[in-house]
Image: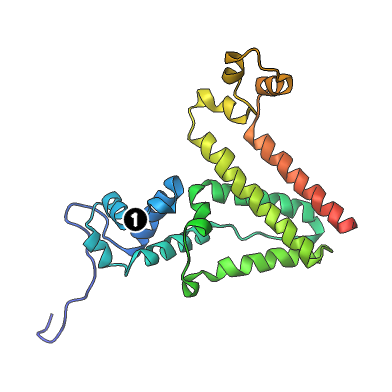
Amino acid sequence: MTGTERPKRGRPAKADGREPLTKDLIATVGLRIARDEGFPQLTMRRLADEIGVTVRALYNVVADRQEVVDLVVARMVERLPVHEYDPDDWQGSVRRMYRDARVAYRSFPRATLVSLDETFTPAEVPVKRMLEPERQLAFFVGLGLSLEDALTVRGSFLVDVFGFALLIDYRFDRTDPSARAMLGQPVPLPWLDAHPEVQAPLAREAARRQTDPDALFEAMIERAVETIERLRRR
């Protein structure tokens, strides 16, 4: 290095082997917190503790918590599938759309509530987030649905997948296997057994049947396909 050259700026690896503090690391850890506990738990203090740095160190990399939220939302959008819509096999396209979305939202279930918990910086919203709804609506309209019906089908799709990720998959994935059977019971069988005087024969019969989340999700998909077919004929 000559006397006129300046050293390159950067954040070298930590001497203790820890990963250098970067926006990528902040987005990764931030999404993990939001995934498991929701965005309200994603505070600068919590983020710093999880990474093992000071809050001041975070502010050397990001401007504020809003930037952290924007980074995490961008990371979420990266993981969302880009659906392939085939009008000649629209039923197969709808089934793949549901299944692929379930896999994605299942990987960050609590974070799906971001629209209720946070606001986004418009300029930071990934283009992919804006274009995918357009492609989806164009697919439904191309099948013969009105724009109003296409919006209804899209809304049902989001409710189905978000609701399943939160109410079924989130609980199922974090429940001890021995207790998972109760999750699909209208009323948990131990509750009914503790109150034999309660007249609920259908709930008791349903509780004795094994409910498979995957089978339940597939049945929901078929209901969506039937709904679209009915709207096409209308």
Identified at 49% across, 31% down, the residue is 175
Whole-percent x and y of residue 86?
A: 75, 60
Quarter of the rendering containing residue 231: bottom right
Residue at the front extreme of this rendering: 197
Say whether residue 35 is left or right of residue 157.
Answer: left
Q: Nearer the viewer, residue 188 or 77?
A: 188
Q: Nearer the viewer, residue 34 or 102?
A: 34
- Quadrant where the N terminus sits is bottom left
Quarter of the rendering containing residue 182: top right
Q: In the rendered view, would you say 153 is above or below 196?
A: below
Whole-percent x and y of residue 104?
A: 55, 51
Q: In the rendered view, would you say 59 is above or below 202?
A: below
Q: In the rendered view, would you say 205 is above or below 142?
A: above
Query: Label 1, on which residue?
Result: 43
Identified at 31% across, 54% down, the residue is 47
- Quadrant where the C terminus sits is bottom right
Whole-percent x and y of residue 201?
A: 73, 19
Say whether residue 74 is left or right of residue 141.
Answer: left
Say whether residue 229 is left or right of residue 58.
Answer: right
Q: Amino acid at mark 1?
A: Thr
Residue at the right extreme of this rendering: 233
Identified at 22% across, 57% down, the residue is 54
Q: Nearer the viewer, residue 64 or 210?
A: 64
- In terms of secondary structure, where does tag 1 sit? loop
Q: Nearer the viewer, residue 119 or 6?
A: 119
